[in-house]
Image: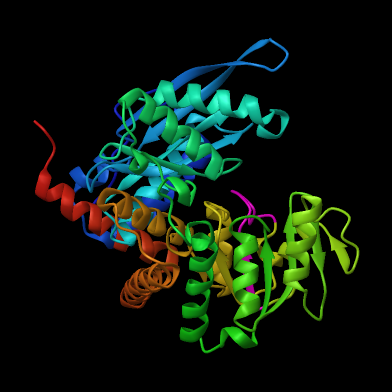
Amino acid sequence: MARVEASSLEEPLEWDTPLFLMARAQFEQALPYADVSPMVAERLSFPERALIMSVPLRRDDGRWQIFPGYRVQHSTVLGPTKGGVRYDPEVSLGECAALASWMTWKCALLRLPYGGAKGGVRCDAHALSPHELERLTRRFTSELFAAIGPQEDIPAPDMATNEQTMAWMMDTYSTQKGYAVPEVVTGKPISIGGSVFRREATGAGVVMCAEHSCERLGMPLAEQRCVVQGFGNVGGVAATELHAHGATVLAVSDISGGVYSPDGLDIPELHAYVAENGSLAGYDRCTRITNEELLELPCDVLVVAAREDQITGANAGRLSTRLVVEGANGPTTLEADAILAERGIPVVPDILANAGGVTVSYFEWVQDLGRLFWDRDEIRIKLADKMSDAFGRVWSVAEEKSITFRQAAMVAAIREVAGALESRGIYP
């Protein structure tokens, strides 16, 4: 059995934050079942490299402000690194390191030729004007120029970033290269090489996994009562997909709070309201609830699609669901995982459930490299095939080893990277 040795450094490493230590603990919990060498276990315990930078921004009123920026590349064993860029007040080196490692496992599990990366700028994007966001993005891209590229590291949208952010990144990188390089980022507008179905991909993949899980557990999705925490690019799409499958969506929420109806919500009406008003705030055609109350509503399927650390040791014992599906990255703590396992509530882990986004990002990258594009139906079919294959392998490992879905997903992913690392070795 492989075992991760303690770092030879006595002091904690710079990325040893609670979130990174949680990600590493998930890795360690899977190692006894993965049958990999100590060399592989030790190498994959740490990011390969991390970049910290200061990003100067000239505000609209002429003031200058400096923001911390980060990019962490966890593994290049399978290929170039891939991962989102987020603008958030809580962005840190440790957060990026944790998310980069999860992205490595996600890509490996879906058998994509990528390693994991993550980056961002510690800022409040909502406090910046569109012109300030553009200047911040272009300067951040310039600072990253030597570290990113179609064969090195391919950024994508994440929290508070979007297609426009990626367009600015692509243009800035291309300007410095001297020619258009659409494949340097994914999640960009279709007009400059983006892919159809990219925006919906993560939420659609979440529901594909929910459907596979419900089928295996003998509870057809169309008959289930569902709750979705989050109503953005992931949760909003997941709610739409669940509604389209015939499931009853009891509650959804965003940063402003949640809405609940025991008879089911009108999801298209909610989307129209948010499009007009910017959030669910003020919607009064059903019961208002908090995000905390939403998690504990009685339901069959709970989709957690907000952010990290939502299901914890404090509330896991009060969840009243038959299945948890993780649309967000790291929404369930280690303590909560143990409680849910003891209670017999299966969790479809983030590295499987929300892998639809990076899978269609891979399709976008391939299309850009070949300058040949597919239509929506082709991409949805390709995504469904990838998600189904990964889900089947995770289910098989879980049954074979009598372990949780999270452990099984990690085992399957670790084996993919370990096989490549064993073949390549470590230079020199």
Rendering coords of residue 393 (x, y %): 32, 72
Q: Quadrant of residue 44?
A: top left
Of residue 259 and residue 133, the one placed in the foreground of this image is 133
Task: Give me the residue at 32% from left, 55% from top.
Answer: 367
40 in relation to 379, above or below:
above
Of residue 82 and residue 216, the one placed in the foreground of this image is 82
Task: Give me the residue at 56% from left, 23% from top.
Answer: 135
Q: Is residue 409 visible?
A: yes
Direction from residue 290 to residue 239 in the image, left or right: left
215 in relation to 13, above or below:
below
Rendering coords of residue 190 (x, y %): 47, 51
170 in relation to 394, above or below:
above
Q: Quadrant location of the N terminus? A: bottom left
User: Start and end of the magenta stretch?
Assistant: 300-314
Rendering coords of residue 19 (x, y %): 52, 41
Q: Is residue 379 magenta?
A: no
Of residue 210 and residue 161, the one placed in the foreground of this image is 161
